[in-house]
Image (cartoon, helix red, strand yellow):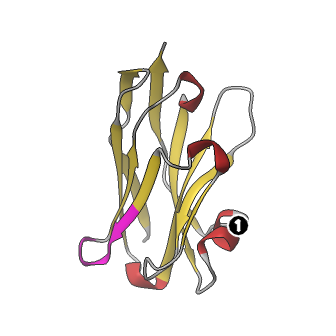
Amino acid sequence: QVQVVESGGGLVQAGGSLRLSCTASGLTFDDYAMGWFRQAPGKEREGVSCISYGGGSTYYTDSVKGRFTISRDNAKNTLYLEMNSLKPEDTAMYYCAARRSRFNAQWVCLNTMDYWGKGTLVTISS
């Protein structure tokens, strides 16, 4: 049974930092591209950042470029999202997702994922 579990969310002030983590079990992690998605109240879910199965390709949505960094540790079956210079508009539920794919990270972020976590809440106060 595949399980995807996020952690690391919380409440921080604008300008602060958070590091999200995601562990995936029940799958061969290094066969899967991974991604972080978010959904704010009243808004559609968006792909924040994705990374290819081997880590050689990454994608960021424009609003987080230069502030967020995605990485993965295939030996630990873990995905990370380092978030700096956080803004109130980054407030959302953040979801980790996996897709068995050899395509590049941008393609992954714009297409359907195979497995999803339940999310971790990120709240940025102004």
Q: Is residue 64 above or below residue 34?
A: above
Please name whichever residue, 93 or 3, is drawn nearer the observer in this view of the structure. 93
Badge 1, how many Cα within 10 Å: few under 14, some, many 20+? Answer: few
The structure residue drawn at horizontal position 32% and vertical position 41%, both measured from the top left corner, is 8
Residue 28 visible in the snapshot: no
In the image, what residue type sits under mark 1? Thr
Among all residues in the image, which is located at the extreme left?
A: 76
Residue 80, percent across and down?
Answer: 36, 57
Among all residues in the image, which is located at the extreme top?
A: 126
Q: Would you say 42 lies left or right of 83 here?
A: right
Let me know if residue 73 is in the magenta part.
yes
Residue 111, percent across and down?
Answer: 73, 67
The structure residue drawn at horizontal position 41% and vertical position 25%, both measured from the top left corner, is 15
Among all residues in the image, which is located at the extreme front?
A: 66
Q: Would you say 100 lies left or right of 45 here?
A: left
Q: Which residues are magenta?
A: 71-76
Question: Total marks drawn?
Answer: 1
Question: Which residue, given by chain and number where applicable, does mark 1 sit on?
Answer: 112
Instruction: For the N terminus, give its image quadrant.
Output: bottom left
Let me know if residue 115 is in the magenta part.
no
Residue 94, percent across and down?
Answer: 51, 42
| Picture quadrant of residue 22 | bottom left
For mark 1, give the secondary structure.
Answer: loop
Q: Is residue 1 above or below residue 117?
A: below
Residue 86 visible in the snapshot: yes
Please name whichever residue, 63 or 27, is drawn nearer the observer in this view of the structure. 63
Residue 3, percent across and down?
Answer: 41, 63
The structure residue drawn at horizontal position 62% and vertical position 79%, both measured from the top left corner, is 104
Q: Is residue 31 above or below residue 88?
A: below
